[in-house]
Image (spheres, grey):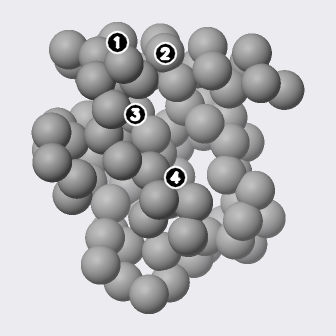
């Protein structure tokens, strides 16, 4: 996990679309859909696994995106997803 990343947040695994293949989701995932690899505690099952998509590996905690809490991260990432279509 990146420094500052909130364990159990999972916003980056829900809000944005991911166009690359994810184990169990060969077509990726649409925005707003929970990744199948996000466990019941909102932790990535693929963290540290070579099958984890590169886009996920490159995502780092940034206070301007992730905010102060999970709901803020979900709102910002949802807005960014819609604004960059």
State which tag comes first along the sequence, 4 or 3. 3
What distance separates the C-alpha of mark 2 from that of mark 4?
18 Å
**15 horizontally vs 29: left or right:** left
Q: Give coordinates of residue 22: x percent, y percent.
A: 61, 70
Q: Above or below — where is 68 with respect to 65?
A: above
**61 horizontally vs 81: left or right:** left
Label pair 3/2, CB-CB below 8 angstroms: no
State which tag comes first along the sequence, 4 or 1. 4
Q: Which mark is residue 35?
A: 4
Q: Give coordinates of residue 3: x percent, y percent.
A: 15, 48
Q: Above or below — where is 15 with respect to 43?
A: above
| Residue 57 sits in quarter | bottom left
The residue identified by callout 1 is: 72
User: Closer to the observer: label 2 or label 4?
Assistant: 2
What distance separates the C-alpha of mark 1 from that of mark 3?
9 Å
What distance separates the C-alpha of mark 4 from that of mark 3?
10 Å
């Amino acid at each position: 996990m990146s420094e500052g990343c909130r364990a159990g947040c999972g916003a980056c695994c829900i809000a944005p679309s991911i166009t690359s293949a994810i184990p169990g989701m060969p077509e990726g995932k649409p925005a707003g859909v929970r990744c199948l690899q996000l466990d019941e505690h909102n932790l990535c099952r693929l963290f540290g696994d070579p099958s984890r998509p590169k886009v996920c590996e490159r995502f780092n905690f940034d206070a301007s995106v992730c905010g102060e809490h999970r709901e803020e991260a979900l709102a910002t990432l949802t807005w960014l997803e819609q604004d960059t279509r």
